[in-house]
Amino acid sequence: MDINLEYYKIFYYVASYKSITLAAETLSISQPAVSQAVKHLESGLSCTLFVRTSKGVRLTKEGEMLFSYVQRGYEMILSGEKKLSEMLNLEQGEICIGASDMTLQFFLLPYLEEFHERYPGIRVTVTNAPTPETLKHLTDGKIDFGIVSTPVDRKPNIKTVPVKEIQDVFVAGRKFEYLKGQTLSYRRLMELPVMCLEGSTSTRQYVENFLAKENVHLTPEFELATSDMLIQFAVRNLGIASVVENFAAEHIKSGELFRLTFESELPKRKFCIVSNERIPMSAAAKRLLEYLMDHRE
């Protein structure tokens, strides 16, 4: 049965208002056009849907049955349009972001707070994972975009935009104060109890690749899951921690930790926003991404 869906829309309004005149006014079309649409629908369905009365029209038994279905369907469409409008106007929606502890704490978190205050109806989910896993989530379409730290392996269709510089350092507690004020070679680290992040994080990879160029190969005293844990171990004098400086800043300021000085600094690296150009983003994700781009350092 090939019936113009516009006829069902007109049928819905005529049945709702029980009036061809009111339906025509609501739809901003002429009364004859409404009447003609009803006739076409009745002809296509081979039954009478309305009976004229002195006050307008009323549904026949067949019309009542049809209306019970059309009403649910059309009002679901109207609800869908309303929800879509709310999403496009950022009144509601959902965003999924990939970020590590480091990128969340030292870049993303304050912007998420501001964004949530401005768009409280948008739900934000953060998938916490190191850079390699975040890139996999992005490739698989599990997140809208990610905040990662370099180095970032180049992948097809993945766009990378730097947003903030970071500095890798080695820090130690009071037990190692005899090293304070000295300018060390990186080979000296092979004689000291060094602590690193475990696994294949971008931080561990970056530091190890740099040290390898200096012919330095470490056997860590401890390998820990997070930089916060490395800092706590360093404060308790359990070793010299390899961390991004932001994690140690407060403890360096308080004097609990100090930064070791070397003949040369590790080159600075960056936090980057990564997005998959093959996968379209929701309006909410696009707005947050634009907001982050506007605030990159």
Image (cartoon, rainbow, N blue to C red):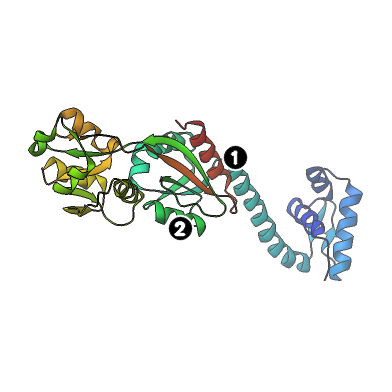
Q: Is residue 286 above or below residue 18?
A: above
Q: Which residue is mark 1?
A: 89
- Which element is circle 2 on? helix
Q: Amino acid at mark 2?
A: Lys
Residue in the picture at 88% in, 48% down? 31
User: What x and y, as percent, mark residue 290?
Assistant: 54, 37
> Which residue is disc 2 drawn over?
136
Return the residue nearer the eye: 95 or 212. 212
Looking at numbered disc 1 in the image, what kind of residue is underneath it? Asn
Relative image position of residue 36 (x, y in whole percent) = 90, 56
Q: Gap between marks 2 and 1, in whole Å?
A: 30 Å
Q: Which mark is residue 53?
A: none
How busy is the neighbourhood of tag 2: few (under 14 within 10 Å), some, or many (20 plus)?
A: some
Q: Position of residue 283 (x, y in %)?
A: 58, 44
Q: As drawn, is 257 to the left or to the right of 114? A: left
Quarter of the N terminus within the rendering = bottom right
Residue 199 sits in quarter: bottom left
Q: Does residue 47 appear in the picture of this structure?
A: no
Instruction: Point out residue 136 in the picture as x, y percentages from the top left corner.
Output: 46, 58
In the image, 179: left or right of 65? left
Quadrant location, the C terminus: top left
Which callout, 2 or 1, points to the residue nearer the camera? Answer: 2
When asked about the image quadrant of residue 102, the answer is top left
